[in-house]
Image (cartoon, rainbow, N blue to C red):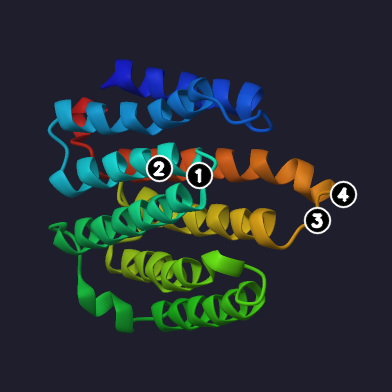
């Protein structure tokens, strides 16, 4: 697994340094996709849960699609990431240490309430700005927030705490991405910084989720 961690991390750093602001190219798409595909291959070879392997694989597909310059590819990419989040939900719920009753225990209800408020605010903000992508974006919001909420069924100790961290960082990454794509102007200083924040938080989130569910002896 260490080799695949290394490949994924190297591809991630190359993308961060060289391609965050680069024009569309097949090389850019390959580097972006490889950074997560390597984690998926490594998880498969290490005997990781099928839902983890599949979530990483469809996320890698989403990376390829979103890196291509077309609305159809973007919509398919959003669908791929939505599928990835649903697979993570399945992964969380089927873990032997998952306890659904944790959703009723403090502070989980407050966290869920905050996620609902966040989703409503983001939906109101993006609905008039997302244009033809409005409905895919609206459908995506509750799916990723559901992934964050369901992570609360996992214990807050041991390796699985990294799954909670990964879910939270994933939400942060997509929140910044939404601002970059639909809210910030091209002249904004934040627009120049946003791609670096999006990419670094996204890869860290996927790495945290991968680490949380791999067999302990193989990490």
How far apart marks 4 and 1 lie (CA) works out to 24 Å
Asked if the residue under mark 2 is in contact with the one under mark 3, i.e. CB atoms within 8 Å, the reply is no
What secondary structure is found at the residue carrying circle 2? helix
Label 4 Cα neighbours within 10 Å, binned few <14 / some 14-19 / many ≥20: few
Q: According to the image, label 4 marks what residue?
A: 187
Say which label, 2 or 4, has the lower sequence index: 4
What number is the disc on residue 171? none
Say which label, 3 or 1, has the lower sequence index: 3
- Above or below, comparing residue 41 to residue 57 in the picture: above
Q: Is residue 144 left or right of residue 70?
A: left
Asked if the residue under mark 4 is in contact with the one under mark 3, i.e. CB atoms within 8 Å, the reply is yes
Asked if the residue under mark 1 is in contact with the one under mark 2, i.e. CB atoms within 8 Å, the reply is yes
Residue situated in front as seen by the camera: 94 or 59: 59
How far apart marks 3 and 2 lie (CA) works out to 28 Å
- Above or below, comparing residue 94 to residue 35 in the picture: below
Q: How many marks?
A: 4
- Above or below, comparing residue 24 to residue 187 in the picture: above
How far apart marks 2 and 1 lie (CA) works out to 6 Å
Q: According to the image, label 2 marks what residue?
A: 206
On the image, the x and y values in percent for residue 101 come to 23, 79
Quadrant of the snapshot with the N terminus:
top left
What secondary structure is found at the residue carrying circle 3? loop
Q: Nearer the viewer, mark 2 or mark 4?
A: 4
Q: Nearer the viewer, mark 3 or mark 1?
A: 3
Q: According to the image, label 3 marks what residue?
A: 185
Which residue reaches farthest top?
A: 3
How far apart marks 3 and 1 lie (CA) works out to 22 Å
- Quadrant of residue 14 within the rendered picture: top right
């Amino acid at each position: 697994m260490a080799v695949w961690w290394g490949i994924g991390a190297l591809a991630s750093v190359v993308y961060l340094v060289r391609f965050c602001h680069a024009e569309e190219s097949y090389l850019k798409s390959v580097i972006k996709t490889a950074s997560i595909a390597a984690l998926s291959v490594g998880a498969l070879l290490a005997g990781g849960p099928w839902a983890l392997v599949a979530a990483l694989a469809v996320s890698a597909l989403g990376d390829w699609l979103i890196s291509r310059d077309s609305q159809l590819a973007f919509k398919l990419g959003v669908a791929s990431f939505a599928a990835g989040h649903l697979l993570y939900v399945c992964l969380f719920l089927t873990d032997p240490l998952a306890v659904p009753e944790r959703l009723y225990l403090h502070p989980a209800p407050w966290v869920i309430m905050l996620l609902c408020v966040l989703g409503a605010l983001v939906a109101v903000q993006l609905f008039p700005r997302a244009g033809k992508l409005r409905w895919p974006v609206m459908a995506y919001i509750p799916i990723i927030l559901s992934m964050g909420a369901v992570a609360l069924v996992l214990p807050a100790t041991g390796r699985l705490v990294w799954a909670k961290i990964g879910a939270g960082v994933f939400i942060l990454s997509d929140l910044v991405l939404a601002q970059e794509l639909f809210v910030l102007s091209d002249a904004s200083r934040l627009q120049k910084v946003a791609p670096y924040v999006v990419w670094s938080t996204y890869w860290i989130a996927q790495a945290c989720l991968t680490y949380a569910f791999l067999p302990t002896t193989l990490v």
